[in-house]
Image (cartoon, rainbow, N blue to C red):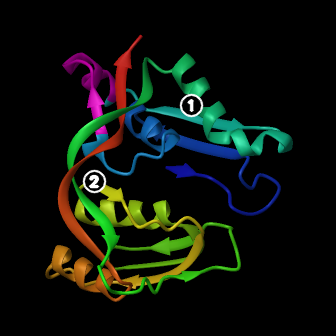
Amino acid sequence: MMKQPRMGIFRNRRITIINLVPNVILREAYDISISKKIVYQTIKDSLISNENPYCVDFIVAEDNKENLKTLFQKELNAHLPVKGEIQKRMMPCYVLKPIEGKPITIIPSTQSNNNFSFDGLAFNGVGIPIHTFISYIENGLNYPVYDATGLTKCYDIAFSKNNVEPLQSTKDSLAKFGLELVKDQKEMDVLVISSR
């Protein structure tokens, strides 16, 4: 289990993890949404990353909450049996981009609180950056998605699809926003996990 409070005294200041293996903990720390964006230096690193669950309760001071993830990464790399590092790698992916000649209809938000809920068939977000929505798409398709939307604000997004044809349904729903997914190869952030 993993919790990161979005309200109350520990809002954006605390990450609590109960019985998760290093691989999953590092994925959360580095905002990597799917395992296809993880590279292990050796087979041994892969094995170590997927055994022996850990519990972590990490809290930062109020004046450090903007650095929560950076400080979390630093502490994990100092104490887990493996460490993580973001590197750039060329990889096959879908590129999410505007449909030529169509306007993008995603609505800029009046908020920036990154509040969202989702399940396998729907996503609802208020005041979210586009990378939060892209993580949802990546998880649904289990495939990397490269952001070429040019969307830099926070947005209100209500999205739904069906589970009969996940890829086509996702594409159809994105087209309503004026966006499309195109297969390509791009240099993307990957999480490289290695032992000490």
Mark 1 vs mark 2, CA separation in Å: 22 Å
Q: Nearer the viewer, mark 1 or mark 2?
A: 2
Residue at 33% of width from left, 43% of height from top? 188
Percent across and percent down for residue 169 are 21, 82
- Disc on res. 86: none
Percent across and percent down for residue 56 are 59, 34
- When asked about the image quadrant of residue 60, the answer is top right
Residue at 31% of width from left, 31% of height from top? 50
Say what secondary structure mark 2 lies in.
loop
- When asked about the image quadrant of residue 39, the answer is top left
Q: Look at mark 1 in the image and give the residue it sits on.
A: 73
As rendered, which of 133 and 124 lies closer to the eye?
A: 133
The mark that comes first in sequence, 1 or 2, is 1
Q: Is residue 115 left or right of residue 9?
A: left
Say what secondary structure mark 1 lies in.
helix
As rendered, which of 195 and 55 lies closer to the eye?
A: 195
Q: Are marks 1 and 2 in contact (CB under 8 Å)?
A: no
**Mark 2 residue type:** Pro
Q: Is residue 72 left or right of residue 18?
A: right
Q: Residues within 10 Å of mark 1 (few under 14, many from 20)?
A: some
180 shown above or below 10: below
50 shown above or below 158: above
46 shown above or below 66: above
Question: Is 125 inside the magenta-drawn segment?
Answer: no
Residue at 73% of width from left, 46% of height from top? 13
Provide the residue span drawn in magenta: 38-49
Q: Which image quarter is the C terminus in?
A: top left
Percent across and percent down for residue 26 are 45, 35
Q: Is residue 180 left or right of residue 52?
A: left
- Disc on res. 144: 2
- When asked about the image quadrant of residue 123, the answer is bottom left
